[in-house]
DNA sequence: TACTCTGCTACTAAATTAGTAGCAATGGTT
DNA sequence: AACCATTGCTACTAATTTAGTAGCAGAGTA
């Protein structure tokens, strides 16, 4: 699947509205999961694979390439890590952690 | 695909940690998009289809059922709408709108 | 009755993801 | 140097998910 670059055609928007490009990206399996796990700190490829139970290496690699191309993740000596932009993105979604706990309670789980 | 109910096995967590169930849900195509579009106000099935360019009715129906089962969306006389929980969820992700604009700028798009 | 609109189901084709095997490269050990 | 372990990833197939399209049942109107 093409990388959802803002300004190009993405799911939900012919013109590539930034929010639609972002939702397209985040709506792909494991995109959010990778960001979530990387927030715990940089990780090597295999370490990241373990943090994300069940992700296949080919898909992990695909997602990492997308996230790197879009400047959300970067690769350095200690492995993969969030960029400052990526960290900012994480900060926005961080409250989902608490929200999900309330949600689980309300669902009686 | 099974509905990612917190407490049951979901992608990324055998035990169904709430956050993993949520990320599984939101990581499905059009989940975030439907929530985003519904925030503009309640909509009938066909109206929602139009807000979400390109979504197929079968998938829209599948997503709606999931979101309803998980108490994020509700169905009433005026069609589909976010529940209070769903609105709270939207409030958390609302800043993604601005974030995506900065992001697009930095990417030079 | 006929016409329109809505909500949705059904079906097939295309695309994505899972699952697994394994290879090239790096670094330590002996 | 030969051997072994680890890492980063590619390749391939099978399973699952999504797109795309057709169309039907029911409600409202005229």
Image: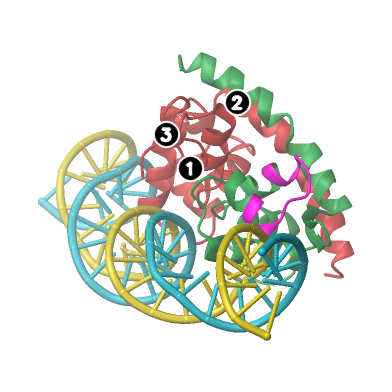
Chain colours: A green, B red, C cyan, D yellow
Residue C11 drawn at (x, y percent): 18, 63
Badge 1 vs badge 2, beta-carbon distance below 8 Å: no
Q: Nearer the viewer, residue B31 or B54?
A: B31
Q: CA distance from mark 1 to mark 2?
A: 15 Å
Element marked by disc 2: helix
The C terminus of chain B appears in which quarter of the rendering?
A: bottom right
The N terminus of chain B appears in which quarter of the rendering?
A: top left
The range drawn in magenta is A37-47
Residue identifier under label 3: B9
Q: Reply above or below: B63 against C19.
A: above
Element marked by disc 1: loop
Q: CA distance from mark 2 to mark 3?
A: 15 Å
- The image quarter containing residue B36 is top right
Q: Residue at x 67, y 31 (%)?
A: A96
Q: Reply above or below: A91 against A63.
A: above
Residue identifier under label 1: B11
Left or right: A65 as drawn, with respect to A103: right
The reply to whether label 1 and label 2 mark residues of one chain is no
Q: CA distance from mark 1 to mark 3?
A: 7 Å
Residue B69 drawn at (x, y percent): 41, 28
Chain label for disc 1 = B
Chain label for disc 3 = B
Residue identifier under label 2: A100
- The image quarter containing residue B39 is top right
The reply to whether label 2 and label 3 mark residues of one chain is no
Check if residue B106 falls in the magenta segment. no
**Number of the front mark, 1 or 2:** 1
Element marked by disc 3: loop
Q: Nearer the viewer, residue B4 or C7?
A: B4
């Amino acid at each position: 699947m093409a990388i959802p670059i803002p300004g190009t055609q993405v799911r939900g928007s012919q013109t590539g509205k930034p929010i639609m490009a972002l939702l397209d990206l985040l709506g792909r399996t494991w995109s959010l999961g990778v960001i979530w796990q990387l927030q715990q700190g940089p990780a090597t490829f295999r370490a990241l694979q373990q943090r994300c139970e069940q992700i296949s290496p080919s898909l992990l690699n695909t997602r990492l390439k997308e996230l790197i191309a879009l400047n959300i993740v970067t690769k350095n000596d200690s492995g993969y890590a969030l960029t400052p932009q990526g960290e900012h993105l994480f900060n926005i979604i961080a409250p989902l952690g608490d929200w999900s706990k309330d949600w689980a309670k309300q669902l009686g789980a």
